[in-house]
Amino acid sequence: MIIVLKPGTTEAEFDHVIERIHELGLKPHVSKGEHRTIIGVIGDENKLQAEPLQAIPGVEQVLPVMKPFKLASREMHKGDSVVNVGKVKVGGGSLAMIAGPCAIEGSDILNEIAGNVKKAGANILRGGAFKPRTSPYSFQGLGEEGLKILRDVGLAHDMPVVTEVMDPRQVSVVEKYADMFQIGARNMQNFDLLKEVGQSKKPVLLKRGMSATVKDLLMSAEYVLAEGNPNVVLCERGVRSFEDSTRNMLDMSAVPNVKGISHLPIIVDPSHATGRPDLIPPMALAAVAAGADGVHIEVHSCPEKSLSDGPQALLPPKYADVMKQIRKLAEMFGKTF
Amino acid sequence: MIIVLKPGTTEAEFDHVIERIHELGLKPHVSKGEHRTIIGVIGDENKLQAEPLQAIPGVEQVLPVMKPFKLASREMHKGDSVVNVGKVKVGGGSLAMIAGPCAIEGSDILNEIAGNVKKAGANILRGGAFKPRTSPYSFQGLGEEGLKILRDVGLAHDMPVVTEVMDPRQVSVVEKYADMFQIGARNMQNFDLLKEVGQSKKPVLLKRGMSATVKDLLMSAEYVLAEGNPNVVLCERGVRSFEDSTRNMLDMSAVPNVKGISHLPIIVDPSHATGRPDLIPPMALAAVAAGADGVHIEVHSCPEKSLSDGPQALLPPKYADVMKQIRKLAEMFGKTF
Amino acid sequence: MIIVLKPGTTEAEFDHVIERIHELGLKPHVSKGEHRTIIGVIGDENKLQAEPLQAIPGVEQVLPVMKPFKLASREMHKGDSVVNVGKVKVGGGSLAMIAGPCAIEGSDILNEIAGNVKKAGANILRGGAFKPRTSPYSFQGLGEEGLKILRDVGLAHDMPVVTEVMDPRQVSVVEKYADMFQIGARNMQNFDLLKEVGQSKKPVLLKRGMSATVKDLLMSAEYVLAEGNPNVVLCERGVRSFEDSTRNMLDMSAVPNVKGISHLPIIVDPSHATGRPDLIPPMALAAVAAGADGVHIEVHSCPEKSLSDGPQALLPPKYADVMKQIRKLAEMFGKTF
Amino acid sequence: MIIVLKPGTTEAEFDHVIERIHELGLKPHVSKGEHRTIIGVIGDENKLQAEPLQAIPGVEQVLPVMKPFKLASREMHKGDSVVNVGKVKVGGGSLAMIAGPCAIEGSDILNEIAGNVKKAGANILRGGAFKPRTSPYSFQGLGEEGLKILRDVGLAHDMPVVTEVMDPRQVSVVEKYADMFQIGARNMQNFDLLKEVGQSKKPVLLKRGMSATVKDLLMSAEYVLAEGNPNVVLCERGVRSFEDSTRNMLDMSAVPNVKGISHLPIIVDPSHATGRPDLIPPMALAAVAAGADGVHIEVHSCPEKSLSDGPQALLPPKYADVMKQIRKLAEMFGKTF
């Protein structure tokens, strides 16, 4: 931690800062320059980051030196983590190919979609039973009935399944049916929910919030890890921006950015990021080229009649096309799925 | 709803779109132009907004004409709503002057702060018992013990109290002690939580999410209203932006913007918006001049030792100074508190 | 300047960093912590900021301590600067009330508008002769003919005039007719243009770019000041954001933010910031309450027939209404115009 | 164009809107719904887009149906444009591999870098002689002397050269030495400069502004095309966002987004977009996978001593590594360079 003092700080203010540092059991290193005095503080930075040093009179800036996350950081865990979702491995060269409809609407339609995506190469089936909808008047999902359908269709096609959990009270029922929890973008900082899934052993797909920095995303992962669940897969799915021709802005650089500072796998969801079927295939390819550990794509046999987010779903034949190209690309980079 | 067709749409595609509109019990009005065909769709737009018309082949754009919220809209309720928080009125010329520490840390310190802010003119006391913290290693709040302290200190100073609720499971305990629920920015789209406080009769202070548009904010209010609780006060507290010298960017124009399209009161929180004590007083004054129904300010007697967000709190004398100016401004605009 | 080294930096890398610092004639202060080594560098920070220290092997972060601007900073010039625009003072308690149409369309219409805004209290007349238009097919302004009209109308109403200059080659002709140059948001980092107006003695109204931070704005002011022209008035006019119901997001906190670190006057332009006539009056009032040194408002007698940006202009009677309120507010804060 | 009227619009207001539409020589199609009246306006939309219809009393919204650009649109020109830069083709399956230092610092160093990047596969040499620098105290470039060095080194290595032009007065001198003009992000809406290079026949590399939408970028291209110069190559180089660990946010989806609506080639500049050497290789690969027509990378033999933007440059061996992978990827997609 580095503390920079304001120009014109008094002797008394300076002494008070030094005293506070000693009170915290830490050691100050003072550099007095022409324009500013700088204090390097040596010791447990996590302790310091929780302290409102900025509020001490005379302090101009407090600059953290260490990353604020620990368990999620690569300094803690040098190699790439591999997360098991049912029998599917995610990370370390194994790609998660997650596909399925936005919402579970019924057994037949899900079965048809699952058959198609499995054949195209998908290895994890997705579908929402509890849906976070901007409008209270939109379809809110089938609930537990939907979870049963999802599990049964997953078993029939030998695919592990992932589904969103929105409320800490839903964790136990979702755990009963799903192989992986999804925490949606709107709940990335729903800390009680993060703690609840952190107490499960089932893996968690943690989507980046629409206004979350890469650091915020890793801090939310830290919540899950700190509760004892090490099985977190991150997901870049776009952030809010001024660009009005796509639903969100896909921050592709988040993939290598996260991989540089964290050992956790990270996948990309071009469906929610762009909201446009024409942009999904090139963004899926770009994600694999950027080093992502998988791709999450919405697929629906009849987007125009789907009950949720139809316009952003790919038709099964389009999905099969992009999967062929992804396979070639994965081979080129020595990855498998 | 307006549907714009792509250039080169086939006759069959056009017929299919028209058929879908009729299926939904609605009436199409077709305008064929030189470059584009436009279809005006007359009928219940709420019904249409839930339909994935964008996914129909041949459709280029779907343009909604109506606002997606209903109960929150001024078309529904012409006058300004007034929300009662204990004995304090908010809206319609009555200002909410909410003040207090970020977190409840103990009885004595809260009592001291409450005495100071009450004397300066505050009419609602705030303090957090459940704290949403970016880091799992930061202070998470005193929980129910904190709620009791808050209630007792509120009673002692004859001030209604507001406190954050983060989890649907906390709603009943918070309801027992608080006069108003606060839904924090990170939970603005925690829809299960919104439904839960919507089933209470106690008023709700709904803070704007860091990446929420004004429309998103009103859609979240709609969730609470749709459950039967009409007592919602909105709060602008800044959104994420590229400006790196303030914590968030305070969108001051959200105040008149919301007031133009909704009857709900809206207040401003310059403490969380700016994160800088030097900017809080001018932004509080600007909020009142912009027509806000109140101001929410963090006040702490010793920011450098506070357990949460100390650096952004005002000292009690600074709070008293700004309140003097706010009082003069309120008088000028014919408002009271 | 503070240099933080990566964990695991070698002895040779460390020595190389120290050597580079000495080469630059500066003095390193080393603090070796458990996790990181920190080097405080004492000396002329401006010299250092131009050096790519970040690229030295072993360097993790380079943290500047000083603001990168000098002449624009309050450390350099403690009091508030007052800029003279013709006979009108801007800053130090004197407000600039700039009003007029977006574009100069003709002598009669400008004359009518000028008469109205002068009567309402405006003290500087604005109007564009060279227009930066997003589309090459939109009206591009009357050029020198427009400048003459502006000057003549200004003289007739005894008001100094401000108009935009977009190209270094236009500076001499604009200087001939105008009392103040306007640098538009799109040209805030047109550095050759900044240098050119920096060589004039006429004052410059420098508008914040749509993606410029407060620091970027002050760096652009520094370009003008560094050429010898001290007469810069800054203008907050909104930045790009995800909010889609206003043209831009007005960053009201930029007003006290700039005033804390710079001596230059700063005004607010709610017309371009919001793009909505209903939001202009409350934002103009909020600007004065926030401490702005003036307000810039577009006024047009017939917005629906104006050749540029009609929808965001106020009608003269609406302008007169808001000016009455601004006057009361200014008095309350001890300001005049 | 679609005009939506406010609820409660009077008969007289309605008649006035219809009259204005007829005055403009256009034909209205009226659809009266339960809540709103919608008017489809048939005719030359370019004419309408320049009109302030929004300002007519009773008008709630004006919704454009057509894209505002014409010459740049794919409706105008179905196939992909191919732009010749010296002997190098850009677009239609031919990739531009642009590389070189940020600034031209001298003949020897440029010669060394050019030799390295040419060997690695680069086909266009870049280097800045006029530098847009945020600070007036930073190195501003060698000017014409730099242009001569660039031309000579380009000739020696048989590579066409591209360099930035910042000021309309520099166009003729830059044209003398360079094979392609670069318009930097800060000048994307410097309309006088766009017109000036539009009057040249030499190709233009037009970089996206930091707060420009895809539509804004194409409107700026339209300025160049409208002057008669069809040789425009677009460049995505990141936009401003709240993410603070990268210099800008690379909007990778802009590549297929632009390709869907425009015939112009588009390349990606991961150096300026990310500002971090570790992120450049994965983003360069992702760009090619996303369908970009080339990649623009800064390369410097000694980033720590470069006079401009050193920290974001790749070392020549790193550049050679990423080029090997790009070549394999290009082959896979049937592209050449």
Image: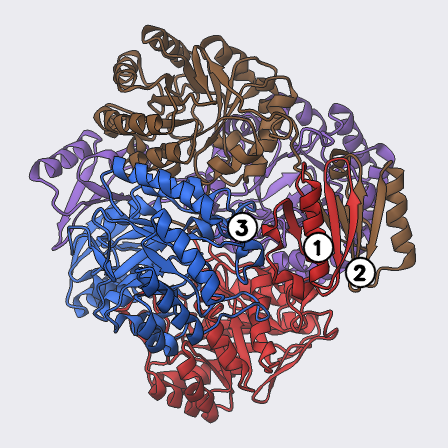
Chain colours: A purple, B brown, C blue, D red
Structural distance between the alpha carbons of marks 1 and 2: 19 Å
Please give left or right for residue D53 compared with residue C88 in the image.
right
Residue at 84% x, 51% y is B30
Structural distance between the alpha carbons of marks 2 and 3: 33 Å
Amino acid type at circle 2 is Gly
Looking at the rendering, which quadrant does residue D174 occupy?
bottom left
Amino acid type at circle 1 is Glu
The answer as to whether the residues below labels 1 and 2 share one chain is: no
How many residues crowd around disc 3 within 10 Å: few (fewer than 14), some, or many (20 or more)?
A: many
Helix, strand or loop status at disc 1 = helix
**Letter of the chain that mark 1 sits on in the rendering:** D
Label at residue A241: 3
Quadrant including the N terminus of chain A: top left
Looking at the image, residue D53 lies above or below residue D83: above
Name the spot of residue D242 as percent of width and height, x first.
Answer: 45, 49
Please give left or right for residue B85 compared with residue D292 in the image.
left
Residue at numbered disc 2: B33
**Letter of the chain that mark 3 sits on in the rendering:** A
Residue at numbered disc 1: D19
Name the spot of residue A80 as percent of width and height, x first.
Answer: 53, 48
Helix, strand or loop status at disc 2 = loop
**Letter of the chain that mark 2 sits on in the rendering:** B
